[in-house]
Amino acid sequence: MSELYRRFGSTLATLFLALIAIWLAGMVLAPNLMMIDYALRPNLLPAEVGGPRDVYSLDNILYLANESVHRAIFFKTVWASALVAFLTLVVCYPLAYWLAQRATPNRAAVVLLALTVPFWINEVLRTLAWYILLAFRGPLNALLLSIGLIDRPVRWYGDVGVLAGMVYAYILFMLFPIYNAIESLDKSQIEAARDLGASVWRTHWRVVIPHAKAGIATGCVFTFMLAAGSYVAPALLGAPGSRWFTEIIYNWFFEGGDWNRGAAYALVLLLLCLTVVLVTLRVARVNLTDVAK
Amino acid sequence: MSAADRIARGLFGLYFAAFFIYLFAPLAIMVAATFNTSRFPTITPWQGTTLSWFNELAADTGMWQSLGTSIVVAFFVVAVALPIGTAAALMLTSLHARARSFLYAVMVSPLLTPGVVIGIATLVLWRQLGVGGGVFLIVLAQASFIICYVMLMVAARLQRFDRTQEEAAIGLGASKFMMFRRVMLPFLKPALIAAAFLAILQSIENYNTTLFVRGFDTPLTVYIATKVRTGLTPAVNALALIMIAATLIGATVYEIVRRRSRNAS
């Protein structure tokens, strides 16, 4: 801190510190603390605020634990988000490997550029594209009917639609960390494994994947977090039977009118994501400093 | 080449083709549906080619209003995020290793927070202060994590800053303020321009956070999502087509600026 003052003088340094304080204290810390405060208080009429019933408790969080429908949707969101992360990994790994180890530099540059194109377009439009593609009388059903794979149109909206749309939306968050990790692997290690008689599978399992572990962990963590916190894909591509935890939170705020319970649910979501992020990174021995690259 | 290799290569070719079809087919279909006369956007069946959905879009006052809201929000997000992100990056480079990695972890934490949670936290804090959702809260909520991107981009450029320049300016009698304005800011300029572009794109495309803090204001993404559920016509596709074109142009400019900022020393 004294270094900041030495470099920029007291006026500028104080200004910088004030700006950082506004951000971290006013825009990050205070909102989160207030959310915790909301989560721990009951939902009261304005007249009752400050009264005898206005006490801290875990009631709102326990409500989630005891309400079987919401609890089921919460756990479903957790495992479905994990599934999204896993599917995205499976979809991206071969391409990441090819880009990092096999492609010529020029080809890799072209493919990387092509990959980024859909991701400059916003998530709502990307999801809209899937909404149109998967419609009951839409192009996918028309195609499958015409080649005879199905006899009658399939209702894709629901779990399948949500999964397809989410994997699509988060490809880049998986691809780039893995690509960066595999790129730093020396080609001679792969050749050595092959010369020593390892099969393709074994080479990947014992050489490439262990080397890319940090990248894989980073990609999975981001994808899981984005999937669990997504609202647009389940809202547009879901069906009544495939509700997502964020939709329940939204309803508490804007339909149920119980912000305290909504804040408690949001807090649970935040804790879930933080736990998954920190545990995964610890297990994979990734430093937080390396994540945001 | 052995038979096994040939099979592996063939399989990879199939996968590669499937990957890119998966990536581009939905967008291509969405764009193509703009030109179909069918009231629900689709390409099957093709009922006739038309440009009329562009006219319908142009006549949609709600869309123009929401576009205006998004532009206002993006403008203020940039105005908030650039100074704070720059200050944060300068702070990071003035710290010793241990303090730096702690502060770094704190500063990237908004990126690891689900967007809906950022929106909700901002909403409840400001309700307690008597301020309801609207453009003001959208700006604050979006900026709270967009600052992280600005900070990362400015910090990346600062890593290649030669500190002797700073000392030379001071040694030649420049005030600290003069040094900041005439040496540091010009050096950071390419990164700041690129960060501003990224901030605008991030702001306009944001949905998850914005949804919770929007109050009665309707930015573009919220407007589109509402349309999808209440009255989707290919006019929305026409809007998508225009946004895709605009984002591609923006992205190209961004890439050029970024490369220039990487190459310029």
Image (cartoon, helix red, strand yellow):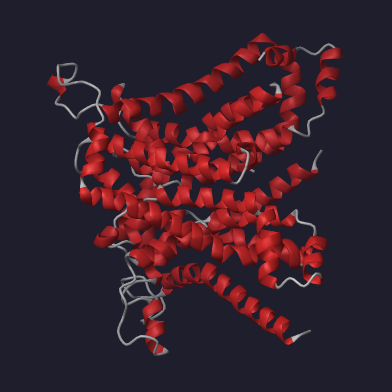
Q: Quadrant of residue B37?
A: bottom left
Relative to residue A108, is residue A57 drawn left or right?
left
The residue under the point 29% across, 31% down is A39
The residue under the point 67% across, 83% down is B7
Q: Is residue A247 above or below residue A129?
A: above
In front here: B239 or A102? A102
Q: Residue furthest top?
A: A10
Residue B239: tell me if it is visible: no
In front here: A16 or A47? A47
Q: Is residue B233 above or below residue B215?
A: below
The residue under the point 19% across, 30% down is A43
Q: Is residue A250 above or below residue A39?
A: below
The residue under the point 72% across, 64% down is A108
Relative to residue A255, is residue A234 drawn left or right?
right
In front here: A259 or A64? A64
In front here: A88 or B33? A88
Relative to residue B104, is residue B36 drawn left or right?
left
Quadrant where the image shows the C terminus of chain B: top right
Place of residue A187 in the rendered image (x, y in percent of width and height, measured from the top left): 80, 62
Place of residue B73 in the rendered image (x, y in percent of width and height, measured from the top left): 45, 38
Quadrant where the image shows the N terminus of chain B: bottom right
Place of residue A106 in the rendered image (x, y in percent of width and height, measured from the top left): 77, 65
Q: Is residue A94 above or below residue A49?
A: below
Q: Quadrant of residue A205?
A: bottom right
Place of residue A55 in the rendered image (x, y in percent of width and height, measured from the top left): 21, 21
Residue B230: tell me if it is visible: yes
Q: How many marks?
A: 0
